[in-house]
Image (tube, rainbow, N blue to C red):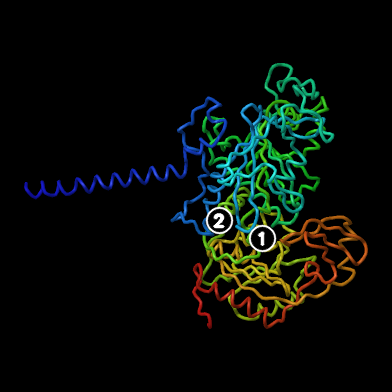
Amino acid sequence: MLVTTHLHRRLVPVLASVLIVFSLTFLYRAYHLYPSDKLSQWPHAAASGLSPTTEPLDEPSDYRAPAHRSEDTCATRFSTAYLEGLRNRTGSYCTPGSRSSLTCFHTKARDDEPDDSFCIGRGAVLDPATRKFHLDCALRKLEPEEVEQGILPFNRLRGYMYDTGPRNVFRDAVIVRQETGLARRSGETAVSEALDAEHMHLPASSDSSDGAPSSVLPPPKTYLLLKREGETNPWHCLMEIFSTYMTFDVLRMSRDPSRGGAPFFATDEADDTQVVILDSREDGPFFDLWTLFARRRPVRLAHLLSRAGNNNADDDDAAAVDAVRRDANIIVPLAGGSNPLWREEWHVQPCHAAPLVDVFSSRIRGFYGVEDPPVRGGEEPIVVTLIDRRETRRLKDQAALLAALGKRGLHIRVQAVDFAALSFPDQLRVARETDVLVGVHGAGLTHVLFMRRGAGAVVEIQPDGLDQKGYRNVANLLDLGYFRIHGAGVSMPVDEADKDTEEEPGKEREMDSLKGVETETQGRDNSTNTSTATGVLKKRGDWHFMDVQVDEARFLDVVETAVKFMYNKALWSYDVNG
């Protein structure tokens, strides 16, 4: 009895201590995930008359929290800390008397570069006269403490290459009122007092004449305003889609005071969201991926406006036009050029954990239903895939090099794949089945993103003089082996160098991650120029437009090194000198 009483007296304080630690830990995590005092930064929080909700936010469930929440470079750029950083630097830009609202989120990927931003506006109306969305928002002056917290003035939002980014989207597609009256200025027409159905020549109702529900979808509530860098280059296109997906993730993780503290964007709102294309580019092979987070099929702004004057509109676009005669939401996403993977292409990042990249890869593969192949090992060969470039930066004597590689007795199966000739889902399947990916530097190496984590290796052949780190960093983030050599540039034959300009004059060529490249103009002579932020690159002598030659012994050596790196991965078990 005495022993029992003694144990009871000792256990009570221990259990009490455990309970206190658990409670404090829960409160600490709750504060950092849902900081209630952030609402005090919002001018409209009190004026709205809405009390913050205590319901949990609709946070993306497919992220896995890192084992530790450090402030190091890897965590702040490639984990959920990047999303949290955006959420925690949020500014409201309209005065309390404004009918519309405008909220922007900011982050800084690198200390030596400007901030990146994205925005969401509520109460927007598309005016056919100006061909722009209007926000009835009188911009307010930021408080000193907001500036100290990193909230950017509206006029400091960034623009990016290829005329993309928030600054350029607002310039081309949105009018934000800056004074009480919307007088004409700079040739812009003021917003009409009421953009009703009659003004916009729209059907009065979406119901059929007999009272039965119409087959036309209900009007979208939210419009993503998109300017693209290109439509065919996989790196550029996927970075834009990646950045936009993170935009929606942050909106789902952030409380909106005007909605009583509910998230800015809930998962089920994707059904009422549509991408509005502002550029005039072709759709391209990645176009359907824009329905990942905005499930209405994308519509071009010019087409949307043209439907406004068409009384016979009877499809999805009619519903879209019908919506913008009333209040709508607009989202101006993070630019592709702001993506942390883009920003680190010239700097080595020794990071080996990247929840953001893992989730993005999984989402893309899930969208197309691409399943993983069985884990290989035993007597099955290691699959070596060479990216078969067909236009520029081709590997000289490629067939002979692959034939020599096949004779080395390395337990391998070698294949040369022209990714451009495959559908994107098939490209993903090839990437998932590849153990060693080999390629000359270029956008084809974007497929590194979709290789299996910790179960592969990459061989990159860079032209002499290039020291780009982008694909090396991606390989590190996925815990893949990375091996690099340089090859000599070889001028393309004149007829092949000019083939693209003869067949496709004016078409923008693949820029393959060249930092600072803006546009390209093509002519029919031999001096096609590439306009950049720092000058003009000539086709002749520029590595972008040259083939690459590597000595056979060096090629075999680097690929064999990558293959032997795989000898004890998965279920294989080979001696490196066996």
Q: Which mark is residue 470?
A: none
Residue situated in front as seen by the camera: 492 or 184? 184
Q: Position of residue 516 (x, y in %)?
A: 74, 59
Q: Which quadrant of the figure has residue 29?
A: top left
Instruction: Please determine whether, in this image, residue 547 is positioned above or below residue 510.
Output: below
Q: Residue reaching furthest top?
A: 210
- Total marks placed: 2
Q: Which mark is residue 78?
A: 2
Q: Residue at x 11, y 49 (%)?
A: 6
**What amino acid is labelled 2 in the image?**
Phe
Residue situated in front as seen by the camera: 390 or 512? 512
Question: Image check: 450 left or right of 202?
Answer: left
In this figure, which residue is indicated by the disc labeled 1? 446
Q: Are marks 2 and 1 in contact (CB under 8 Å)?
A: no
Q: Which marked residue is nearer to the observer: mark 2 or mark 1?
A: 2
Q: Which quadrant of the figure has residue 357?
A: bottom right
Instruction: Please determine whether, in this image, residue 197 is positioned above or below residue 21.
Output: above
**What amino acid is labelled 1 in the image?**
Thr
Q: Position of residue 179 (x, y in %)?
A: 72, 30
Q: Residue reaching furthest right?
A: 525
**Secondary structure beneath label 2:** helix
C-alpha gap between disc 2 and disc 1: 17 Å
Question: Image check: 258 left or right of 279?
Answer: left
User: Dot 2: few (<14), some (14–19), or many (≥20) neighbours within 10 Å?
Assistant: many
Instruction: Please determine whether, in this image, residue 513 is positioned above or below residue 307.
Output: below
